[in-house]
Amino acid sequence: MEVDMEVTQHTEDYTTELESTKHIKNDDLSFQQGEIIIEEISRNHKLIHRHKLTRNEVSIGRNYQNDIILTDPHICPQHLSLKYSQGIWHLNDNNSVNGTLLDNNQNRRQDAHQQVINDGDVIILGKSQLRILFSDHKVSETIALSPFESLIDLIRHPIAVFISLAVFMLIAGNISYLNQQVETNISQLFVSAVSMSLLFSLWPAGVALVSHLTKNEPRLFAQFGISFVFFILMWFSDLLEEIVAFNSASNSVLGLFIALLPILLAFSLFWLNSYIGFHMSAKRRIVVAISITALLFGGAYLLQYSKKREFNPHPNYNATIMAPVFLIAPSNSVDNFIKQSNNLFEQASKAALEDD
């Protein structure tokens, strides 16, 4: 009986100890700490780095003892501090040399000393900018993956890039061979094809470089794969335009539509370059693609128009000469042509006699 009483007593003591422990933990949890997200952004509000801190005071400056260390030489070692009190964040400028400005959501700038910080405010210190966000900040809607992603994943594969480059070099070598007026050898054509490939490689390499400098993912293989595929399609569009011109009249409407095909291909290329290398809205991507396309083709047209004479005394005969294999309509033999011509002359003679 005494043993049972001792066990009960120890159990009650242990329960009391647990309750007191739980009470202490609840008191600790009731101690509220501030949570803040600080984003380092560029002057055009492009994200550079993001910090998430859970504390009641945050120091910012060039000193290595700060919570946020910035390298801008126009910022003081202990430039400013953020303090959390009663659910509100306050900004204090520590008598810095260049001061601190607070840009709020109403696009108003004011001296940041002893100011209350709201969600989305931008702190301007030196030549740097910090955007303040709270944990309940509403994020933008999730962007669905484009159906082009599967195509891009296929084209950016190293084997696909190598095949595109090889096909491009074959086409470049063939064009170089057709434009040669003197006899040439394979080595000269190879050098010409490699030079043309290197020249066209400047575009995807430049786009990837700009993407890297603007803190985006370059995706170099994807840029090269997409670009060379569209370069090949543009050359095929030129061939299609020549075939249409060879089989139709000079003022054919079909020729006009075919002439617009390279413009559409160029717009699609620039749109995909922007999609692969940069994070931007769909509207801005379209504007960028249209601007580059207009600049490219508009500049080429103005350059061609500037070289055009106001009056050319010589007749302008625009002829497209191609092999008979590119002729869509069936060709006519010489005998049939002479026979049809004789029939026309006979019909004209009969009509003249009837009129007399």
Image (spheres, rainbow, N blue to C red):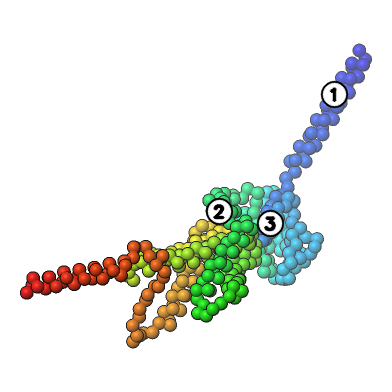
> How far is mark 2 from mark 1, CA to CA?
69 Å
Position of 353 with respect to 9 (left or right) is: left
Image point (45%, 63%), residue name: 264
The label on residue 12 is 1
Decide: is 306 above or below 86: below
x, y percentage for residue 100? 67, 66
- Element type where label 3 sits in the image: strand
Check disc 3 and give the amino acid type. Answer: Arg
State which tag comes first along the sequence, 2 or 1: 1
Check disc 1 and give the amino acid type. Answer: Glu
Decide: is 4 above or below 254: above
Quarter of the image holding residue 322?
bottom left
The residue that mark 2 highlights is 151
x, y percentage for residue 168? 56, 66
Image point (58%, 71%), residue name: 193
Q: Quick one: 219 or 258, which is closer to the camera?
A: 258
The residue that mark 3 highlights is 50
